[in-house]
Image: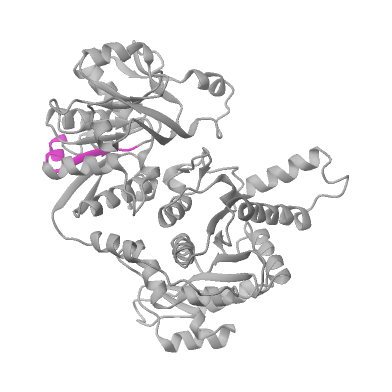
Amino acid sequence: MAQGHKYVFVIGGVMSGVGKGIATSSMGLILQERGYPVNLVKVDPYLNVDAGTMNPTEHGEVFVLNSGLETDQDMGNYERFLNRDLGPEDYMTSGMVYQSVINRERALGYGGKFVEAIPHVRDEILRRIEAAAAHSGSTISVIEIGGTVGDFQNALFIEAARVLKMQNPQDVAIVMVSYLPVPGTIGEMKTRPTQHAIRELNSYGVQPDFVIARSPMPMDEKRKEKLAIWCNLRPDHIISAPDVDSIYDVPLNFEKDELGDRLLDALHLPKDKPADFTAWKEFVRRTKVTSPEVKIGIVGKYFDTGDFVLSDAYLSVIEALKFSAAALEAKLKITWLNAKDFEKGSKDIETLREFDGILVPGGFGEAGIEGKIEAIRFARENRIPYFGLCYGMQLMVIEYARNVLGLTDAHTVEINPATAHPIVDVMETQKDVIAQGNYGGTMRLGVYPAALKDGTIAREAYGAAQVDERHRHRYEINPAYVGEIEKGGLVFSGTSPDGVLMEIAELPKDTHPFMLGTQFHPELMARPLSPHPLFTAFLKASLKK
């Protein structure tokens, strides 16, 4: 038996977006259930230092870790599947790697040598992979390399995998997640694109040990044999991964093909502990109930993607709703509502009556803001359960100030710096940052505590006097208006422990069944086996409606 740390590299073939992240998450869960400490690492080959400055419409959600690092949405899947927090060591981008190498070169850290992609950049990648393993104390690291084989951007990361495999062949397994199309006019699964992808990987000096074959339908034995013959693979190392109703079915399907046993064999690890998926199977069962149905309207703005709705911008929100619906054994039905439609009049605000609950997620900027405020007003006046996240809380307070307190010019200085009533103002700590144009990684980011008031919806939902939640914002409720707003009937039920920052706003239950907003992002802490209490409370109220 090899005694070194074990590594599984996950590389894409044929096309992106076919589920490398879910495959990585599923393998991590399987190995964890077999009793092995696991850490999952996401490699993003872009030159951004982190994901924080990227447009959610193009890239999808920015997922914030406890540390405050802004990462790719796959990190959220990793945490949800493993049911635990991951650290900043478990994420890297080309930007991070190059920045470290350049900073070291500027400090004469290379002793005057030429600094080159190989070996210096490659070795920094290896250093980070090994540091993540050491920091987590894991036995197995599963490393997802973003993009697909053949991309110029990820070649150095594949080279790092090659070097580790060459040095420690018993400690490293290479998994390719590839796509096998079934053209409608032909009606037959085609293996040739994957054959070409594997040959491309071979040209890097890397041979996959496993292929996870993504396809619209299960892969038959004949195609497994064909792929095995042409690509020098064992047939039982080709894992069929057909389309499924839920991503949470994937680890169970992998286990049917005994992927866990085969991975452990490839890594020369003992198979002493059988996996126990009892709790996971019960969760999956609950996600498939057909009644009662709870209809939630999500009023957002990140939908401008041609003929398609980009739900990835709100991925964690969707998953958090699913987890709480499963906990309540209810069928979740989400409808996407573009806030701009309410502004333009192309959608009647009265259509919101058909929903059991309305949610306004986080975001930035002016687009759709008045449409969101109108939706919030309608939810308040018609006693429809409402849940606002970050910007959704700020706009909830602005709406209340305008339409209940009579502060008709109330606004956020993000949109109207000259407003007579700056209900939402830039945080003091952010003013110099904005003036300097220093936007990357400078928001209020990561985990902060919040103290909860007795007798409130928030306190009842959490069952605790203080909680820790993840943040991502530059603006806050203006402390100068807090007294006037609370006197007018809105309660700030959660604050920073020193009472300065407003973390949760709500209307009392005798005023509204559920009207609550959070400055933080509770969706980032929701997990399949531990749904978030505020999402669960929101759906409970929605089911009652």
Q: Quadrant of residue 456?
A: top left
Please check the rendered image and state whether residue 355 is part of the magenta-colored stretch, yes or no. Answer: yes
Residue 135 in percent (x, y) is at: 61, 50
**Relative to residue 30, is residue 507 drawn left or right?**
left
Figure quadrant of the N terminus: bottom right
Of 322 and 419, nearer the camera is: 322
- Range shown magenta: 349-361
Q: Is residue 167 magenta?
A: no
- Toward which corner of the image does residue 203 lie, by quadrant? bottom right
- Give the percent coordinates (x, y) of residue 325: 23, 51
Can you give x and y, in whole percent of width and height, for residue 181 in the image?
42, 74
Is residue 422 in sight in this rendering?
yes
Q: Residue furthest right?
A: 112
Q: Across the whole image, how many numbered discs are drawn on residues? A: 0
Quadrant position of residue 402: top left
In the displayed structure, 328 sits above or below 452; it is: below
Residue lying at 84% horizontally and 40% vertically, measured from the top left: 108
